[in-house]
Each structure stands twice: as C-alpha cells, then as structure tokens.
Amino acid sequence: MPFEATCARVWKRLSAEDRLLAAQGLVAEQAPEAMGPALFAIAQARRMRPQSARVMPVDQQARALATISNPGEAVASSLLVAFHLGHRRPLLRAFLDGCGIPHEDGILTEAADSVTLSTEKARTAVEKLRAEFPSDQVEVYLNTLWLQDPGRWGMLASTV
C-alpha cells in the first residue's frame, strides 16, 4: 500500500483504540506547542469555547481528541508522534537499531545526523520489522517517519 500524503490521512486509517492511545499520549505530555492546537480542535469539534476545552479533565480531552476524524495536519502530526513515542516505542527502537542509527530509547541523537542511510540497509531493517511487528503497525510507523522528514527518510517510500 502506498504511503498517505498527509498525517491527517494516516490518522484516519488508525483504529479507534489506536487513536485513543495517541490522544492519551499527547494529552499526558501536555507540550504547549501541541496542546494549544489540540484544544482548539476539540473546541471546534464540540462547538465549545477553547477555555472550556482547556478545563476539561485530561481523560475527557483525550477521548474527545480521539473521536475527531480530521483534527488538522499539525494536530494529526503531533498525535502520530505522541503515539509512536509512547505506545510504539519498541518499534522505533527496533527500526533505528536495524538501520544502525544512534538513538536514546527511540529518540535520534545528534550523532544520527552524520549517518547516511542506504536504501539497502533501510529495506533490511523494514524486513526485520515486518517479521517482528504487525504489518499495519509497521506501515503506519514508516509513513509517519517519512512524513516527519521526507529528506532523511525518502527511501522508505520504496520499501512498502
């Protein structure tokens, strides 16, 4: 299956359970640059004032956010990143290890900037991922990675 061209389209492909996990991860993180747009998306979807969304209990914010089918590109991107950094971290670690890219628990280190990933090495790492993880999880992860930095991960589009 070819990659989706936007994070919003990847978000729409996730199951309701995965969307909730992603929203819980984002809300738990409470990063202001991600939460502001997320709370605005909740307010728009629920037809409420942004202040009302801001004072909702965290679990209600996550449930509300998970039900929004199109939260906007920026919010969908933040949700996908939070999802992978939270609930899919073993997949991140396995892929980066397979590629030989330096990281700390799935987060790229500065040393990663000096590593050039070949298509061959990426393909080998993807094959290993497909053997260890469900195919749909691998595809969502690779698509998300590609969307986050197509310059670095462009070769991934040819591995699906």
Image (cartoon, rainbow, N blue to C red):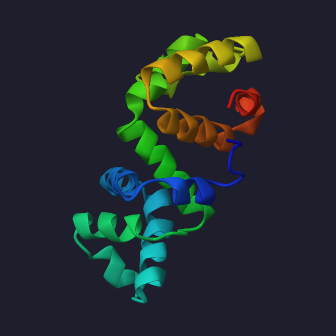
Which residue sits at x=39%, y=26%? 90
Q: Is residue 118 visible?
A: no
In the image: residue 144, left or right of residue 104: right
Q: Nearer the viewer, residue 51 or 73?
A: 73
Residue 85 x/y as whole percent: 42, 38
Residue 66 falls in which quadrant of the image? bottom left
Q: Position of residue 141 (x, y in %)?
A: 54, 37
Q: Residue 57 vs residue 96: left or right?
A: left
| Up-down relation of residue 55 to residue 17 (above or below) | below
How far from the left and from the top, in percent, is residue 12? 54, 60
Please state, as top left, top right, bottom left or bottom right, where the C terminus lies in the image.
top right
* Numbered-mark total: 0
- Picture quarter with the N terminus: top right
Residue 22's spot in the image, x, y percent?
A: 39, 52
Lateral position of residue 25 relative to residue 37, left or right: left
Q: In the rendered view, would you say 53 is above or below 113? A: below
| Residue located 40% across and 88% down the image | 49
Q: In this view of the protein, can residue 125 be seen by the observer?
A: yes
Q: Is residue 90 above or below residue 71?
A: above
Q: Viewer-proximal residue, 18 or 154?
A: 18
Image quadrant of residue 123? top right
At x 53% / y 55%, what residue is drawn?
Answer: 13
